[in-house]
Image: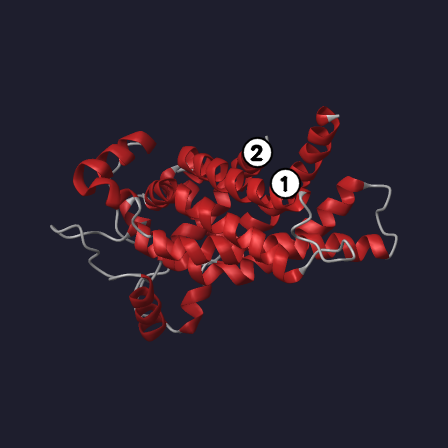
Amino acid sequence: MDFLVGGIAGVGAGFFSNPFDVVKTRMQLQGELRSKGQHAVHYKNIPHAMYTIVKHDGITALQKGLVPALWFQLVVNGVRLGVYRITERRGLTTDSRGRTSLFKGAAAAGIGGALGSIAGTPFFLVKTRLQAQAARAIAVGHQHRHAGTFGALADIYRNEGVKGLFRGVYPQIPRGAVGSSSQMVSFAYAKEWLRDRGLFSNSPVMLSFVGANLGGLVMTLCLNPFDVVATRLSNQAVDAHNKGILYNGMTDCFVKMVKTEGFGSLYKGVGANYMRLGPHTVLLLVCWDQLKILEEYLRR
């Protein structure tokens, strides 16, 4: 039940945040391994990116990769929120006063996030490649020609085997751990801070809403560098030996990005990422809190 509640909450939030995920993916791939001013800028900002995508690819392109994105949300949030809820219910995330422990809460959320991200890697891989597909005039990054979610999974397995389905898994581990721990701990701390001051004590939905907004901001700032690397590794082309053409791995990707594009490249697409993660975090955690209330009621 704990895993199911987390997964349902993630899917519900993912449907509304996917257009920003598409924009984020393309902005992260734009100017790949090119110095500033040495590449075309198809996507200047979030509104311009959405206008450009709709103009060249049609309005439905804003929901590219939706199916694998929802599967990714189901797996990742099912595991990470499930793990966090189990530890939370057993008092493993609080200190002797019953308040959220920074270390314990971060550890529980981080472990759950890492495990969920590992399990969801094949869907993140496919989601990224489908979201990057664009008309030639506005294409960024390598253009994989997959025909849908399950066609992509079949193509990757046929050409690269099981290992290929987990391409880019290494940055997924810190991505999931850092993102989940920063989100869940800041969310819990924000709610405790509000309760201590008697704010929204009679409105659990508003309490969750305000706390989730902070969680989304903190998560975005902590997660973005790993998210850019995961996107790049997932989308890069491979040679005849199934090795990445641009990057040898996570560390190589970090080094090449900073060296050629500057430190700011680690925060490419951060605005779109927040527009995705901010509302997503709010919808996810508000829904999760309400589902937990329902779950407790049903357990009686």
Residue 20, image x, y percentages: 50, 46
Crowding at label 1, few (<14), some or many (≥20) Cα neighbours within 10 Å?
many
Q: What amino acid is found at the position of numbered circle 1 in the picture? A: Leu
- The residue sitting at 70% across, 54% down in the picture is 94
First of labels 2, 1 by sequence position: 2
Q: Return the residue at label 1.
A: 283
Q: Return the residue at label 2.
A: 12
Quarter-of-image position of residue 96: bottom right
Q: Which mark is residue 208?
A: none
Secondary element under disc 1, as helix, strand or loop, is helix
Q: What amino acid is found at the position of numbered circle 2 in the picture? A: Gly
Asked whether disc 2 touches disc 1, contact meaning CB atoms under 8 Å apart, the reply is: yes
Toward the left, the furthest residue is: 240
- The residue sitting at 24% across, 32% down in the picture is 154
- The residue sitting at 45% across, 52% down in the picture is 24
Indicate left or right for 79 with 145 as reference: right
Is 12 situated above or below 80?
above
Indicate left or right for 229 with 188 as reference: left
Is residue 195 visible in the rendered image? The answer is yes
Residue 161, image x, y percentages: 21, 40
Of residues 36 and 299, which is closer to you in this image?
Answer: 299
Of residues 291 and 282, which is closer to you in this image?
Answer: 291
